[in-house]
Image (cartoon, helix red, strand yellow):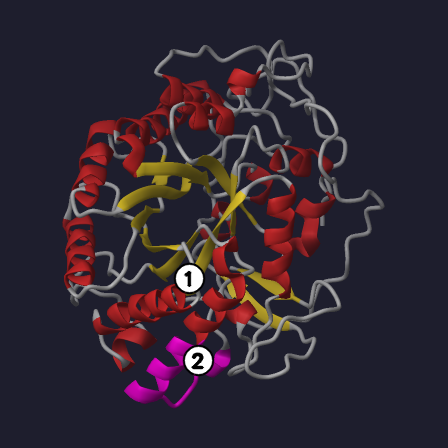
Protein backbone atom coordinates (compact mmCIF):
# COMPACT_ATOMS: atom_id res chain seq x y z
CA UNK A 1 0.00 0.00 0.00
CA UNK A 2 1.02 3.63 -0.40
CA UNK A 3 0.43 6.40 2.11
CA UNK A 4 -1.55 9.45 1.05
CA UNK A 5 -2.01 12.86 2.61
CA UNK A 6 -3.99 15.96 1.71
CA UNK A 7 -4.03 19.44 3.12
CA UNK A 8 -6.29 22.29 2.15
CA UNK A 9 -5.38 23.13 -1.44
CA UNK A 10 -6.31 26.78 -1.33
CA UNK A 11 -7.08 29.14 1.52
CA UNK A 12 -10.86 29.17 1.15
CA UNK A 13 -12.65 26.07 2.34
CA UNK A 14 -16.26 25.36 1.44
CA UNK A 15 -18.28 24.29 4.45
CA UNK A 16 -21.71 22.81 5.02
CA UNK A 17 -23.43 22.44 8.39
CA UNK A 18 -20.40 23.45 10.46
CA UNK A 19 -17.60 25.86 9.66
CA UNK A 20 -14.77 23.72 8.33
CA UNK A 21 -11.25 24.48 9.44
CA UNK A 22 -8.15 24.02 7.30
CA UNK A 23 -6.85 20.66 8.38
CA UNK A 24 -4.86 17.74 7.13
CA UNK A 25 -6.61 14.44 6.49
CA UNK A 26 -4.45 11.37 6.07
CA UNK A 27 -5.30 8.04 4.49
CA UNK A 28 -3.74 4.78 3.05
CA UNK A 29 -4.48 3.63 -0.54
CA UNK A 30 -5.42 0.18 -1.81
CA UNK A 31 -8.16 -0.49 -4.42
CA UNK A 32 -7.84 2.39 -6.92
CA UNK A 33 -6.67 4.52 -4.05
CA UNK A 34 -7.55 3.78 -0.37
CA UNK A 35 -6.37 5.00 3.01
CA UNK A 36 -3.92 5.61 7.36
CA UNK A 37 -2.03 8.34 8.73
CA UNK A 38 1.19 10.04 7.87
CA UNK A 39 2.31 13.65 7.93
CA UNK A 40 1.89 15.50 4.66
CA UNK A 41 4.81 15.26 2.27
CA UNK A 42 6.81 18.38 1.50
CA UNK A 43 5.96 20.23 -1.70
CA UNK A 44 7.79 19.29 -4.89
CA UNK A 45 11.13 20.92 -5.36
CA UNK A 46 10.76 21.16 -9.12
CA UNK A 47 10.69 24.80 -10.25
CA UNK A 48 8.48 24.27 -13.29
CA UNK A 49 4.92 25.52 -13.09
CA UNK A 50 1.67 23.68 -13.78
CA UNK A 51 0.61 23.86 -17.40
CA UNK A 52 -2.45 25.95 -18.18
CA UNK A 53 -4.52 25.80 -21.34
CA UNK A 54 -2.28 25.06 -24.33
CA UNK A 55 -2.22 27.98 -26.73
CA UNK A 56 -1.69 25.77 -29.76
CA UNK A 57 -2.20 22.17 -30.77
CA UNK A 58 0.10 20.23 -28.43
CA UNK A 59 2.92 18.00 -29.58
CA UNK A 60 2.81 14.43 -28.37
CA UNK A 61 5.71 12.03 -28.23
CA UNK A 62 5.31 8.73 -29.98
CA UNK A 63 2.87 9.86 -32.65
CA UNK A 64 2.78 10.53 -36.34
CA UNK A 65 6.24 10.13 -37.82
CA UNK A 66 7.92 9.63 -34.47
CA UNK A 67 9.56 13.05 -34.76
CA UNK A 68 7.18 14.77 -32.39
CA UNK A 69 4.87 16.19 -35.05
CA UNK A 70 1.39 17.24 -33.96
CA UNK A 71 -1.15 14.44 -34.31
CA UNK A 72 -3.83 14.64 -36.93
CA UNK A 73 -7.25 15.52 -35.45
CA UNK A 74 -8.45 12.01 -36.27
CA UNK A 75 -5.92 10.63 -33.79
CA UNK A 76 -7.41 12.45 -30.80
CA UNK A 77 -9.71 10.30 -28.74
CA UNK A 78 -12.43 12.69 -27.60
CA UNK A 79 -12.85 14.05 -31.12
CA UNK A 80 -13.21 10.53 -32.45
CA UNK A 81 -15.67 9.50 -29.74
CA UNK A 82 -17.88 12.54 -30.13
CA UNK A 83 -17.74 12.14 -33.89
CA UNK A 84 -19.57 8.80 -33.58
CA UNK A 85 -22.14 10.08 -31.11
CA UNK A 86 -20.52 9.44 -27.75
CA UNK A 87 -20.82 12.08 -25.06
CA UNK A 88 -17.10 12.00 -24.26
CA UNK A 89 -13.85 10.10 -24.07
CA UNK A 90 -12.26 10.87 -20.73
CA UNK A 91 -9.75 10.08 -18.04
CA UNK A 92 -9.45 9.96 -14.29
CA UNK A 93 -6.75 12.10 -12.73
CA UNK A 94 -5.46 12.51 -9.19
CA UNK A 95 -5.45 16.30 -9.03
CA UNK A 96 -5.66 18.26 -6.83
CA UNK A 97 -3.09 15.92 -5.36
CA UNK A 98 -3.68 13.57 -2.47
CA UNK A 99 -0.36 11.77 -2.82
CA UNK A 100 2.97 11.79 -4.66
CA UNK A 101 3.37 15.44 -3.67
CA UNK A 102 1.32 16.57 -6.64
CA UNK A 103 3.76 15.30 -9.26
CA UNK A 104 1.15 15.36 -12.03
CA UNK A 105 0.58 19.10 -11.60
CA UNK A 106 4.28 19.75 -12.18
CA UNK A 107 4.61 17.34 -15.09
CA UNK A 108 4.24 19.57 -18.13
CA UNK A 109 3.87 16.72 -20.60
CA UNK A 110 1.13 15.09 -18.56
CA UNK A 111 -0.77 18.30 -18.00
CA UNK A 112 -0.62 19.28 -21.67
CA UNK A 113 -2.31 16.03 -22.67
CA UNK A 114 -4.81 16.17 -19.80
CA UNK A 115 -5.85 19.72 -20.71
CA UNK A 116 -6.35 18.96 -24.41
CA UNK A 117 -10.11 18.83 -24.94
CA UNK A 118 -9.61 17.12 -28.30
CA UNK A 119 -8.02 14.25 -26.41
CA UNK A 120 -10.20 14.14 -23.27
CA UNK A 121 -13.67 15.63 -22.95
CA UNK A 122 -14.33 14.36 -19.44
CA UNK A 123 -12.52 14.00 -16.11
CA UNK A 124 -13.12 11.86 -13.06
CA UNK A 125 -11.53 12.79 -9.70
CA UNK A 126 -9.59 9.69 -8.71
CA UNK A 127 -9.64 10.55 -5.00
CA UNK A 128 -10.46 14.12 -4.03
CA UNK A 129 -14.26 13.70 -3.83
CA UNK A 130 -14.19 10.56 -1.68
CA UNK A 131 -15.70 10.68 1.79
CA UNK A 132 -12.44 10.92 3.72
CA UNK A 133 -11.63 14.16 1.92
CA UNK A 134 -15.07 15.79 1.65
CA UNK A 135 -16.32 15.09 5.18
CA UNK A 136 -13.25 14.49 7.35
CA UNK A 137 -15.19 15.24 10.56
CA UNK A 138 -18.87 14.64 11.29
CA UNK A 139 -20.87 17.37 9.57
CA UNK A 140 -17.71 19.29 8.61
CA UNK A 141 -17.38 19.44 4.84
CA UNK A 142 -14.28 20.39 2.87
CA UNK A 143 -15.14 20.92 -0.79
CA UNK A 144 -12.01 22.89 -1.66
CA UNK A 145 -10.30 20.13 -3.63
CA UNK A 146 -13.47 19.16 -5.45
CA UNK A 147 -14.18 22.77 -6.38
CA UNK A 148 -10.66 23.12 -7.76
CA UNK A 149 -11.06 19.91 -9.75
CA UNK A 150 -14.25 21.15 -11.37
CA UNK A 151 -12.81 24.60 -12.06
CA UNK A 152 -9.83 23.12 -13.91
CA UNK A 153 -12.04 20.74 -15.89
CA UNK A 154 -14.36 23.54 -16.93
CA UNK A 155 -11.43 25.70 -18.04
CA UNK A 156 -10.84 23.03 -20.68
CA UNK A 157 -14.50 22.34 -21.54
CA UNK A 158 -14.40 18.92 -19.88
CA UNK A 159 -17.42 17.49 -18.10
CA UNK A 160 -17.01 15.80 -14.72
CA UNK A 161 -18.16 12.41 -13.48
CA UNK A 162 -18.08 12.85 -9.71
CA UNK A 163 -16.77 9.88 -7.73
CA UNK A 164 -18.10 8.75 -5.21
CA UNK A 165 -20.75 9.14 -2.49
CA UNK A 166 -20.76 5.72 -0.82
CA UNK A 167 -17.96 3.16 -0.70
CA UNK A 168 -16.61 0.73 1.85
CA UNK A 169 -13.13 2.21 1.46
CA UNK A 170 -11.44 5.58 2.04
CA UNK A 171 -13.77 6.40 4.88
CA UNK A 172 -12.73 8.67 7.77
CA UNK A 173 -12.02 7.09 11.13
CA UNK A 174 -15.17 8.56 12.63
CA UNK A 175 -17.18 6.38 10.24
CA UNK A 176 -15.17 3.17 10.44
CA UNK A 177 -14.66 3.33 14.21
CA UNK A 178 -17.99 4.85 15.17
CA UNK A 179 -20.52 3.28 17.52
CA UNK A 180 -23.41 3.16 15.09
CA UNK A 181 -27.01 2.12 15.05
CA UNK A 182 -29.06 1.67 11.91
CA UNK A 183 -30.71 5.04 12.50
CA UNK A 184 -27.55 7.04 13.22
CA UNK A 185 -25.52 5.61 10.31
CA UNK A 186 -28.46 6.15 7.97
CA UNK A 187 -28.63 9.77 9.07
CA UNK A 188 -24.90 10.21 8.43
CA UNK A 189 -25.29 8.69 4.97
CA UNK A 190 -28.16 11.02 4.13
CA UNK A 191 -26.30 14.09 5.37
CA UNK A 192 -23.20 13.23 3.34
CA UNK A 193 -25.01 12.50 0.08
CA UNK A 194 -27.28 15.52 0.37
CA UNK A 195 -24.47 17.97 1.15
CA UNK A 196 -22.29 16.82 -1.74
CA UNK A 197 -25.04 16.86 -4.35
CA UNK A 198 -26.31 20.24 -3.17
CA UNK A 199 -22.84 21.76 -3.20
CA UNK A 200 -21.54 20.49 -6.54
CA UNK A 201 -24.91 20.62 -8.29
CA UNK A 202 -24.95 20.24 -12.06
CA UNK A 203 -21.19 20.71 -12.17
CA UNK A 204 -21.32 16.95 -11.82
CA UNK A 205 -22.67 15.39 -15.00
CA UNK A 206 -23.04 12.20 -12.99
CA UNK A 207 -22.34 10.81 -9.53
CA UNK A 208 -21.23 7.30 -8.69
CA UNK A 209 -23.72 7.06 -5.83
CA UNK A 210 -22.73 3.60 -4.62
CA UNK A 211 -19.38 2.03 -5.47
CA UNK A 212 -18.48 -1.67 -5.30
CA UNK A 213 -21.25 -2.97 -3.05
CA UNK A 214 -21.60 -6.41 -4.63
CA UNK A 215 -19.34 -9.19 -3.35
CA UNK A 216 -16.75 -10.72 -5.66
CA UNK A 217 -17.44 -14.42 -5.13
CA UNK A 218 -20.80 -14.26 -3.30
CA UNK A 219 -19.94 -17.27 -1.13
CA UNK A 220 -21.18 -15.30 1.89
CA UNK A 221 -24.07 -13.60 0.13
CA UNK A 222 -24.63 -11.20 -2.72
CA UNK A 223 -23.32 -8.09 -1.02
CA UNK A 224 -19.93 -7.14 0.37
CA UNK A 225 -19.54 -7.43 4.14
CA UNK A 226 -18.72 -3.91 5.28
CA UNK A 227 -19.92 -1.28 7.71
CA UNK A 228 -22.88 -0.35 5.51
CA UNK A 229 -24.23 -3.85 5.06
CA UNK A 230 -23.48 -4.87 8.65
CA UNK A 231 -25.18 -1.87 10.30
CA UNK A 232 -27.91 -0.82 7.87
CA UNK A 233 -28.20 -4.03 5.87
CA UNK A 234 -27.86 -4.77 2.17
CA UNK A 235 -29.32 -4.01 -0.25
CA UNK A 236 -31.25 -1.66 2.08
CA UNK A 237 -28.39 0.85 2.36
CA UNK A 238 -28.10 0.94 -1.45
CA UNK A 239 -31.78 1.76 -1.86
CA UNK A 240 -31.41 4.48 0.76
CA UNK A 241 -28.32 5.97 -0.87
CA UNK A 242 -30.08 6.29 -4.22
CA UNK A 243 -33.21 7.62 -2.55
CA UNK A 244 -31.20 10.30 -0.72
CA UNK A 245 -29.42 11.19 -3.96
CA UNK A 246 -32.72 11.39 -5.84
CA UNK A 247 -34.19 13.65 -3.17
CA UNK A 248 -31.23 16.03 -3.40
CA UNK A 249 -31.35 16.09 -7.20
CA UNK A 250 -35.06 16.84 -7.24
CA UNK A 251 -34.97 19.37 -4.40
CA UNK A 252 -32.32 21.38 -6.22
CA UNK A 253 -33.73 21.02 -9.73
CA UNK A 254 -30.62 19.23 -11.00
CA UNK A 255 -29.99 17.13 -14.09
CA UNK A 256 -27.28 15.03 -12.46
CA UNK A 257 -27.21 11.36 -13.46
CA UNK A 258 -27.02 8.73 -10.71
CA UNK A 259 -24.91 5.61 -11.26
CA UNK A 260 -24.08 2.32 -9.60
CA UNK A 261 -20.36 1.64 -10.21
CA UNK A 262 -18.47 -1.66 -9.87
CA UNK A 263 -15.77 -3.92 -11.30
CA UNK A 264 -16.16 -7.51 -12.45
CA UNK A 265 -19.58 -6.73 -13.92
CA UNK A 266 -18.40 -6.47 -17.53
CA UNK A 267 -18.75 -10.14 -18.47
CA UNK A 268 -21.55 -12.63 -18.08
CA UNK A 269 -21.67 -14.25 -14.66
CA UNK A 270 -23.09 -14.06 -11.19
CA UNK A 271 -21.82 -10.56 -10.41
CA UNK A 272 -23.22 -8.95 -13.57
CA UNK A 273 -26.50 -10.80 -13.01
CA UNK A 274 -26.62 -9.48 -9.44
CA UNK A 275 -26.00 -5.96 -10.76
CA UNK A 276 -28.90 -6.25 -13.18
CA UNK A 277 -31.12 -7.49 -10.35
CA UNK A 278 -30.06 -4.58 -8.15
CA UNK A 279 -30.86 -2.05 -10.86
CA UNK A 280 -34.26 -3.66 -11.42
CA UNK A 281 -35.06 -3.54 -7.71
CA UNK A 282 -34.08 0.12 -7.40
CA UNK A 283 -36.24 1.04 -10.37
CA UNK A 284 -39.14 -1.08 -9.09
CA UNK A 285 -39.15 1.07 -5.95
CA UNK A 286 -39.54 4.21 -8.03
CA UNK A 287 -36.04 5.41 -7.10
CA UNK A 288 -33.87 7.20 -9.64
CA UNK A 289 -30.96 5.28 -11.12
CA UNK A 290 -29.68 6.45 -14.48
CA UNK A 291 -26.74 4.23 -15.25
CA UNK A 292 -24.34 1.42 -14.52
CA UNK A 293 -20.65 2.25 -14.37
CA UNK A 294 -18.61 -0.68 -15.67
CA UNK A 295 -15.17 -0.03 -14.19
CA UNK A 296 -13.39 -2.31 -16.67
CA UNK A 297 -10.15 -3.03 -14.80
CA UNK A 298 -8.82 -5.86 -16.96
CA UNK A 299 -5.75 -8.05 -17.33
CA UNK A 300 -3.86 -8.48 -20.60
CA UNK A 301 -5.06 -11.64 -22.30
CA UNK A 302 -7.92 -12.14 -19.83
CA UNK A 303 -10.12 -9.23 -20.90
CA UNK A 304 -13.71 -10.27 -21.69
CA UNK A 305 -14.40 -10.55 -25.40
CA UNK A 306 -16.02 -7.73 -27.29
CA UNK A 307 -19.20 -9.77 -27.74
CA UNK A 308 -19.35 -10.72 -24.07
CA UNK A 309 -18.94 -7.11 -22.95
CA UNK A 310 -21.60 -6.02 -25.44
CA UNK A 311 -24.01 -8.69 -24.23
CA UNK A 312 -23.71 -7.48 -20.64
CA UNK A 313 -24.10 -3.85 -21.69
CA UNK A 314 -27.26 -4.76 -23.54
CA UNK A 315 -28.62 -6.52 -20.46
CA UNK A 316 -28.26 -3.28 -18.47
CA UNK A 317 -29.58 -1.11 -21.29
CA UNK A 318 -32.68 -3.30 -21.46
CA UNK A 319 -33.50 -2.13 -17.92
CA UNK A 320 -33.80 1.46 -19.10
CA UNK A 321 -30.46 2.82 -17.86
CA UNK A 322 -27.30 4.02 -19.57
CA UNK A 323 -23.93 2.37 -19.25
CA UNK A 324 -20.44 3.85 -19.19
CA UNK A 325 -16.94 2.42 -19.02
CA UNK A 326 -15.73 4.34 -16.00
CA UNK A 327 -12.22 3.15 -15.06
CA UNK A 328 -10.74 1.34 -18.05
CA UNK A 329 -7.22 -0.01 -17.86
CA UNK A 330 -5.62 -3.29 -18.92
CA UNK A 331 -2.66 -4.36 -16.79
CA UNK A 332 0.18 -6.74 -17.43
CA UNK A 333 0.33 -9.37 -14.69
CA UNK A 334 3.92 -10.12 -15.63
CA UNK A 335 6.61 -7.61 -16.57
CA UNK A 336 8.45 -6.61 -18.65
CA UNK A 337 6.08 -6.63 -21.58
CA UNK A 338 7.20 -7.45 -25.11
CA UNK A 339 5.98 -6.85 -28.63
CA UNK A 340 3.56 -9.77 -28.54
CA UNK A 341 1.98 -8.88 -25.21
CA UNK A 342 1.71 -5.22 -26.21
CA UNK A 343 -0.28 -6.30 -29.25
CA UNK A 344 -2.55 -8.36 -27.01
CA UNK A 345 -3.10 -5.31 -24.82
CA UNK A 346 -3.89 -3.31 -27.95
CA UNK A 347 -6.52 -5.90 -28.92
CA UNK A 348 -8.00 -5.82 -25.41
CA UNK A 349 -8.40 -2.04 -25.52
CA UNK A 350 -9.86 -2.25 -29.02
CA UNK A 351 -12.43 -4.86 -27.97
CA UNK A 352 -13.44 -2.99 -24.81
CA UNK A 353 -13.93 0.40 -26.47
CA UNK A 354 -15.46 -1.31 -29.48
CA UNK A 355 -18.12 -2.93 -27.29
CA UNK A 356 -19.19 0.53 -26.13
CA UNK A 357 -19.39 1.62 -29.76
CA UNK A 358 -21.44 -1.47 -30.66
CA UNK A 359 -23.85 -0.73 -27.80
CA UNK A 360 -24.88 2.52 -29.45
CA UNK A 361 -25.88 5.74 -27.73
CA UNK A 362 -26.76 3.91 -24.50
CA UNK A 363 -23.06 3.49 -23.77
CA UNK A 364 -22.36 7.16 -23.26
CA UNK A 365 -18.58 7.09 -23.12
CA UNK A 366 -15.31 5.63 -21.90
CA UNK A 367 -13.07 6.89 -19.09
CA UNK A 368 -9.50 5.66 -18.64
CA UNK A 369 -8.33 5.20 -15.05
CA UNK A 370 -5.55 7.67 -15.82
CA UNK A 371 -3.61 7.50 -19.06
CA UNK A 372 0.03 7.54 -17.97
CA UNK A 373 1.85 4.52 -16.51
CA UNK A 374 3.89 6.86 -14.32
CA UNK A 375 0.76 7.60 -12.26
CA UNK A 376 -1.09 4.29 -12.48
CA UNK A 377 -2.61 2.84 -9.33
CA UNK A 378 -1.69 -0.71 -10.40
CA UNK A 379 1.94 -1.20 -9.23
CA UNK A 380 1.21 -0.16 -5.64
CA UNK A 381 -1.85 -2.39 -5.44
CA UNK A 382 -0.58 -5.37 -7.44
CA UNK A 383 3.19 -5.62 -6.87
CA UNK A 384 5.03 -6.86 -9.94
CA UNK A 385 2.21 -5.84 -12.27
CA UNK A 386 1.74 -2.68 -14.28
CA UNK A 387 1.88 -1.11 -17.71
CA UNK A 388 -1.89 -0.76 -17.64
CA UNK A 389 -2.24 2.62 -19.35
CA UNK A 390 -1.97 3.75 -22.95
CA UNK A 391 1.04 6.05 -22.52
CA UNK A 392 4.20 4.61 -20.98
CA UNK A 393 6.16 6.22 -18.13
CA UNK A 394 7.98 8.48 -20.60
CA UNK A 395 4.74 9.62 -22.26
CA UNK A 396 5.24 7.56 -25.39
CA UNK A 397 2.09 6.12 -26.88
CA UNK A 398 1.77 2.38 -26.65
CA UNK A 399 0.01 0.19 -29.23
CA UNK A 400 -3.00 0.25 -26.89
CA UNK A 401 -3.60 3.87 -27.92
CA UNK A 402 -4.11 2.77 -31.49
CA UNK A 403 -6.25 -0.10 -30.27
CA UNK A 404 -8.64 2.51 -28.87
CA UNK A 405 -8.68 4.23 -32.25
CA UNK A 406 -9.48 0.90 -33.87
CA UNK A 407 -12.34 0.39 -31.43
CA UNK A 408 -13.74 3.86 -32.10
CA UNK A 409 -13.40 3.79 -35.87
CA UNK A 410 -13.61 0.13 -36.90
CA UNK A 411 -10.41 0.65 -38.88
CA UNK A 412 -7.17 -1.29 -38.60
CA UNK A 413 -4.44 1.06 -37.42
CA UNK A 414 -0.80 0.08 -37.73
CA UNK A 415 1.46 1.27 -34.94
CA UNK A 416 3.35 4.25 -36.39
CA UNK A 417 7.06 4.84 -35.88
CA UNK A 418 7.55 6.24 -32.41
CA UNK A 419 5.20 3.77 -30.72
CA UNK A 420 6.57 1.72 -27.81
CA UNK A 421 8.05 -1.35 -29.51
CA UNK A 422 7.93 -3.88 -26.70
CA UNK A 423 11.35 -3.68 -25.14
CA UNK A 424 10.63 -0.67 -22.98
CA UNK A 425 11.92 1.56 -25.77
CA UNK A 426 10.50 3.31 -28.81
CA UNK A 427 11.86 3.51 -32.31
CA UNK A 428 12.32 7.25 -31.88
CA UNK A 429 12.68 7.95 -28.18
CA UNK A 430 11.34 11.27 -26.92
CA UNK A 431 11.66 11.17 -23.17
CA UNK A 432 9.69 13.85 -21.34
CA UNK A 433 12.03 16.53 -20.12
CA UNK A 434 9.84 17.69 -17.27
CA UNK A 435 9.18 14.44 -15.41
CA UNK A 436 9.21 15.06 -11.70
CA UNK A 437 10.43 12.16 -9.57
CA UNK A 438 9.88 12.03 -5.80
Specify the label residue 425 is tagged with. Answer: none
User: In terms of sequence position, does the residue under pointer 1 or pointer 2 come before the other?
Assistant: 2
Magenta: predominant secondary structure element?
helix
Q: Where is residue 338 in the image (x, y as percent from the top left)?
A: 46, 23
Query: Foreground mark, 1 or 2?
Result: 1
Q: Dot 1, crowdedness within 10 Å: few (<14), some or many (≥20)? A: few
Q: From the viewer's perspective, is residue 423 above or below residue 25? A: above
Q: Name the residue under label 2.
A: 175
Q: Name the residue under label 1.
A: 253
Q: Is residue 95 visible?
A: no
Q: Position of residue 159 (x, y in %)?
A: 51, 44
Q: Residue placed at 48% from the left, 72% from the top?
A: 195
The residue lying toward the viewer, choosing from 42 and 267, is 267
The residue lying toward the viewer, choosing from 313 and 384, is 313
Residue 50, by quadrant, is top right
Q: Residue placed at 62% from the left, 9% from the top?
A: 65
Residue closest to the far right: 47
Q: Give the range drawn in magenta.
A: 173-191
Relative placement, left or right, of 44 versus 104 is: right
Q: From the viewer's perspective, is residue 31 above or below residue 239? A: above
Q: Position of residue 419 (x, y in %)?
A: 56, 18
Please, what secondary structure does the residue beneath circle 2 have? Answer: helix
Q: Position of residue 1 (x, y in %)?
A: 51, 59
Amino acid sequence: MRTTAIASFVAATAVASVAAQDSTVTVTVTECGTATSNPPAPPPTDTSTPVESPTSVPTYPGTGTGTGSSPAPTEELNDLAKGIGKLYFGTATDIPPVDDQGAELYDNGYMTILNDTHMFGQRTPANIMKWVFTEPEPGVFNFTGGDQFIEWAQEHDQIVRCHNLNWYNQLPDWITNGNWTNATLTAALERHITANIEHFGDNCYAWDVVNEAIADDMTNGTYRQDIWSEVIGAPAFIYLAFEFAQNAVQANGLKTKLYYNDYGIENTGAKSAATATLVSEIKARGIQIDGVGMQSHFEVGLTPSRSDQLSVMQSYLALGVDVAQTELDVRFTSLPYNYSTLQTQKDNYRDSVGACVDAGAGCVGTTLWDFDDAYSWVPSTFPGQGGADVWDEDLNRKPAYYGIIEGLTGMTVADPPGTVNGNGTVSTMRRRSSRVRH
